[in-house]
Amino acid sequence: MNDGIATAAGIAEGFATAGARTGTLLLAGGVLILTGGLAAAGARYSEEQTEWEMNRSLLDAERASIEAEPQAEFEELVDIYEAKGLSEGLARQVAQALSERDPIAAHADAELHLDSTASPLASLHAAVIGGLFYSLGAVIPLAVVSASPVGPRTELTVVGALLALALTGCVTSWLTGLPLFRLVRRNLVLGVATMAAGVVIGLVSGVNSP
């Protein structure tokens, strides 16, 4: 969501500073919401799917090793649990119990630190969520700039975007337990930098849209 807020705010500031009219701002905003959301979804899907495919490749290689040398792989699993602090006897019992249930899952968890049950549908889910959050974030500054009077339009857009970024920082802090000030400060700095870039471009171009 932060990406959508900052990007839309930067574009809105650039167009507003250049003297663009409300219709042009709404057109640019609509294009950003659609294409930006799709781009964010596509990027997220590509990242998640690539990670899933890499993990699947590791699991396939591990499955082949277990089928080729089951005893050697079992002993490797025992060694892993011993290294975690279990006695040899207990480590062997744990490895035996997990291997009997699902040897691939046992090695995926202990050796590869992977979830063997992960589904490729998770990539699609992450893509949809990422695209929606980007678009929702972009709506905020665009709504402010389109509803604001021409005079204070730039200032109101800055305030609206910064308030939205501060709010997302607060929510993230609440959900993750990370320091509130650090998250809010990071969001605000990135937002200010993005909007400043938009203002500079708008001032340099100085184009009045019809």
Image: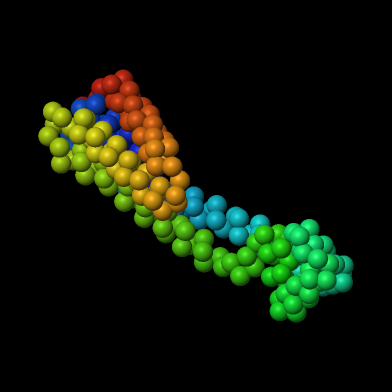
Choose top left, top right, bottom left or bottom right for residue 114: bottom right
Quarter of the image that includes the C terminus = top left
Residue ID at (36%, 34%) = 188
Q: Position of residue 120 (x, y in %)?
A: 56, 65
Q: Nearer the viewer, residue 130 or 115?
A: 115
Query: Residue farthest to the bottom?
Result: 100
Q: Nearer the viewer, residue 168 or 94?
A: 94
**Is residue 124 rendered to the left or right of residue 134?**
right
Choose top left, top right, bottom left or bottom right for residue 117: bottom right
Q: Nearer the viewer, residue 199 or 162?
A: 162
**Is residue 9 rendered to the left or right of residue 51?**
left
Q: Examine the rendered structure and indicate whether residue 25 appears above or below residue 126.
A: above
**Is residue 130 rendered to the left or right of residue 25?**
right
Q: Position of residue 36 (x, y in %)?
A: 38, 46
Q: How many marks?
A: 0
Q: Examine the rendered structure and indicate whether residue 31 appears above or below residue 132.
A: above
Q: Position of residue 65 (x, y in %)?
A: 82, 66
Residue ID at (46%, 63%) = 125
Q: Position of residue 30 (x, y in %)?
A: 27, 46
**Is residue 182 rendered to the left or right of residue 116?**
left
Q: Nearer the viewer, residue 90 or 16?
A: 90
Residue 51 showing in the rendered view: yes
Picture colour scheme: rainbow
Residue ID at (71%, 69%) = 106
Query: Residue farthest to the top?
Result: 204
Residue 74 showing in the rendered view: no
Residue ID at (79%, 71%) = 90
Q: Examine the rendered structure and indicate whether residue 191 appears above or below residue 117.
A: above
